[in-house]
Image (cartoon, coloured by chain):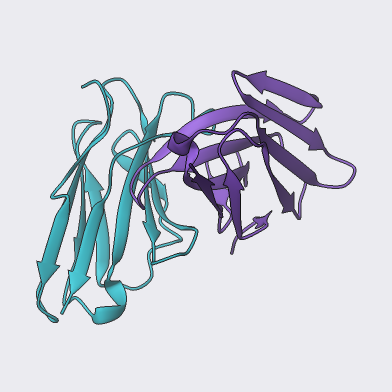
Chain colours: A cyan, B purple
Amino acid sequence: GAGVSQSPSNKVTEKGKDVELRCDPISGHTALYWYRQSLGQGLEFLIYFQGNSAPDKSGLPSDRFSAERTGGSVSTLTIQRTQQEDSAVYLCASSFQEVYGYTFGSGTRLTVV
Amino acid sequence: SQQGEEDPQALSIQEGENATMNCSYKTSINNLQWYRQNSGRGLVHLILIRSNEREKHSGRLRVTLDTSKKSSSLLITASRAADTASYFCATDVNDYKLSFGAGTTVTVRA
């Protein structure tokens, strides 16, 4: 596609429920990243995909968080048993050549009530 | 942990004035990038400066890099209301990961 697409744009969920966040990167971009941004804060790295594999999952905060990528394209970030501290904007980015300029999606604003 | 730190945290200027913000980082880098974020959503890549460059221009943006001081500055000249946003510097932690600072919030008053 023309840009990085994320869905849903907003998600309100009850504490304890599972959520799935979707990212559709730019076609041909092999690198895909998930970041999290809490209110008024900088970006916190979660996970990096190169193709379908995730060589760096070091930023996932707990085992409630998981992510996968299929077909070298769409990625899904899953948060199980959501907690209030999971509330944040989850940003996906893709790039053609790793660190030389990320293209970000518009993010998913997750609110856990 | 965040590699870069922006200064100031917030900046308010009159339309037409210049805005300058700074970024300091801790470890050596191959490149440094600046991004803009409107309304707390997706970030837009503005400019990349490599470690062997000292200054780079793009339209009304001017970026400098001083690797000896581990610092960079972003200057926006002749600011407009549309420049109201948060600005983040990002440094390469390795060959695939960027580390972002907490950002500078710029407000341009009409």
Side (left or right) of A16 relative to B80: left
Side (left or right) of A18 relative to A74: left
Q: Position of residue B103 (x, y in %)?
A: 56, 54
Q: Nearer the viewer, residue B10 or B35?
A: B10
Q: Residue at x 28, y 26 (%)?
A: A26
Q: Quadrant of the N terminus of chain B?
A: bottom right
Residue sitting farthest toward the front: B110
Above or below for A9 versus A100: below
Above or below for B65 versus B59: below
Q: Position of residue A71 (x, y in %)?
A: 19, 31
Q: How many marks?
A: 0
Does residue A20 appear in this view?
no
Q: Nearer the viewer, residue A30 or A41?
A: A41
Q: Residue at x 25, y 80 (%)?
A: A84
Above or below for A93 versus B27: above
The part of the image, by quadrant, that contains residue B30 is top right
Does residue B94 appear in this view?
yes
Q: Residue at x 27, y 71 (%)?
A: A87
Q: Position of residue A54 (x, y in %)?
A: 36, 47
Q: Residue at x 61, y 60 (%)?
A: B9
The part of the image, by quadrant, that contains residue A79 is bottom left
